[in-house]
Structure formats: C-alpha cells, structure tokens
Amino acid sequence: MTAGTPSPDHEPVSASAYREAMAQLASAVHLVTTDGTGGRAGLTATSVCSVSDGPPTLLVCLNRNSSAYPVFLRNGVLCINTLGATQDRLAADFAGRVKQAERFDGRDWTTLRTGAPVLPGALVAFDCRIVDRHAVGTHDVLICAVEALGGIGGAEGLLYAGRRYRVLRREAPAAE
Ligand SMILES: NC(=O)C1=CN([C@@H]2O[C@H](COP(=O)(O)OP(=O)(O)OC[C@H]3O[C@@H](n4cnc5c(N)ncnc54)[C@H](O)[C@@H]3O)[C@@H](O)[C@H]2O)C=CC1
Ligand SMILES: Cc1cc2nc3c(=O)[nH]c(=O)nc-3n(C[C@H](O)[C@H](O)[C@H](O)COP(=O)(O)O)c2cc1C
C-alpha cells in the first residue's frame, strides 16, 4: 500500500499493517533502566516522546509483558539513556539478545538523582520519576518527571528505521 491508497472504509487496520507503517518512521533509540527496591532492570525502547518543558516531562510506552515492566512499577523511577552512533550492540542486547540478569554486566553504570542506572557514553540521559500511568492496549504509557540530565555531549546519534539501526550524521550546514 502506498501513501496515496487508503485502506477501504470500515476495514480495521491489522497489527501487521500497522507495524509495517510504523517501520517507515525513524526513531531515536534508548535504554530505559531502573533500580531500587524492586531490583535492577532495563530494556530497549523507541516509544519515548517529550510531553512538556514546564515542568520537564516525557513519556515512554512499556509493554506490560516485558520482564522489566513490574520492576519499573515497583521502583517508580527510570532513566532514559539515549544511544549514540556506536551503541547499536547495546540496543540489541537490551532488546532481548542478553538475559535480563546480565544486561548491565561489564560497564561502570553511574547514577544521577533517582538512582536509576545511567549509561556511560550515552548521547543524553533523562533521570526520571514516574508520576502517572495509563494503560493503552498491550502497553502502559508512563508519564515521567525529569529530575536530572546527564551526558549532553553533541555526539552522533543512533536511529532505528526500516527495522535496522542507522547513524544520524551531524553534517555541517549547507553554505548559503
Ligand atoms: N513500541 C514497542 O513496543 C516496540 C516493540 N518492538 C519489538 O521488537 C520486535 C522487532 O521489531 P521490528 O524488527 O521493528 O519489526 P516489527 O515489524 O515487529 O515492528 C515494526 C514497527 O512497529 C512498531 N511496533 C512493533 N511492535 C510493536 C508493539 N508491540 N507495540 C507498538 N508498536 C510496535 C515499532 O514502531 C516497530 O519499529 C517487535 O516485534 C516488537 O516485539 C519494536 C519496536 C517498538
Ligand atoms: C528497536 C526496538 C525498539 C523497542 N521499543 C520498545 C518500546 O518502546 N517499548 C517496549 O515496551 N518495548 C520495546 N521494544 C521491545 C523490548 O526492547 C523487548 O521486548 C524487551 O527488551 C524484551 O525484554 P525481555 O526479554 O526482558 O522481556 C523494542 C525493541 C526494539 C528492537
């Protein structure tokens, strides 16, 4: 189906058609991490969006079936670690290639204010407290107050588009 040919009236959009459409979009890639009384956990996510700058608030959509989901609820805090261009292996690891218990191995994770793990070398880190939650279909939309920022470094970012990882190049602006 191309953009000029809408699906027939009254025909529900299938999950596979929806995913195929969503695969056309490019997204930043994040490791969403948590730590606290529920333990440490994390996963790869692209469904992260800025909500407001007053107060600084973002949202992330988490599948309630993921192994990390109950840990996020228990801890009530999370860190959105946005990945840089060279961190695509980490994205795959946190998307299921590595078992949950081993995802944090081999790196010196730090913390900011909430205690959620901050990835060394992240493009940027948003340290958050979960302030609201809405169930929508298979996912929960978590509304998160941003309590601290880290790692704003100007490096090249990682993108996910067309079902693969790509690099967002920082090119010099075209001469006028
Ligand atoms: N938002 C989410 O929960 C996402 C989950 N995934 C997981 O990774 C697997 C591999 O993804 P792809 O290789 O990109 O192929 P895919 O064909 O399964 O997904 C294509 C696109 O559809 C969207 N999508 C996929 N599963 C979704 C879900 N359960 N809820 C909401 N949106 C979803 C995403 O934008 C994804 O990039 C997916 O099947 C899914 O299990 C991937 C991307 C986003
Ligand atoms: C590129 C990419 C983006 C993803 N985005 C999300 C997302 O936004 N929300 C989500 O709940 N799962 C998302 N997932 C799926 C989780 O990363 C994956 O299901 C989870 O890490 C599996 O965890 P488990 O093995 O601990 O259950 C994404 C997967 C990939 C490959």
Image (cartoon, rainbow, N blue to C red):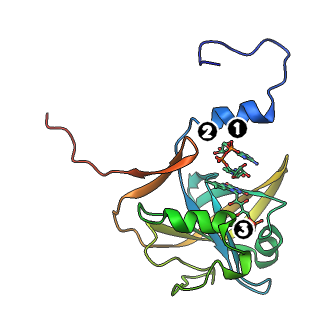
**What whole-number distance in Å separates the C-alpha atoms at marks 2 and 1?**
6 Å
**What whole-number distance in Å separates the C-alpha atoms at marks 3 and 2?**
28 Å
Say which residue label 1 marks.
19
Q: Mark 3 or mark 2, which has the lower sequence index?
A: 2
Q: Residue at x 76, y 78 (%)?
A: 75
| Element carrying mark 1 | helix
Tell me which amino acid carries mark 3.
Ile
Q: Is residue 161 above or below residue 95?
A: above
Left or right placement of residue 34 versus residue 27 in this view: right
Answer few, some or many: residues within 10 Å of disc 3's Cα (few below 14, many 20 plus, some between 14 and 19): many
Tell me which amino acid carries mark 2.
Ala
Tell me where residue 86 appears, x and y as whole percent.
42, 64
Q: Quadrant of ligand 2?
A: bottom right
Left or right placement of residue 171 versus residue 50 in this view: left
- Tell whether circle 3 marks a residue whose Cβ is less than 8 angstroms from ligand 2: no
Say which residue label 2 marks.
23
Answer few, some or many: residues within 10 Å of disc 2's Cα (few below 14, many 20 plus, some between 14 and 19): some
Q: Residue furthest left?
A: 176
- Tell whether circle 1 marks a residue whose Cβ is less than 8 angstroms from ligand 1: yes
Say which residue label 3 marks.
130
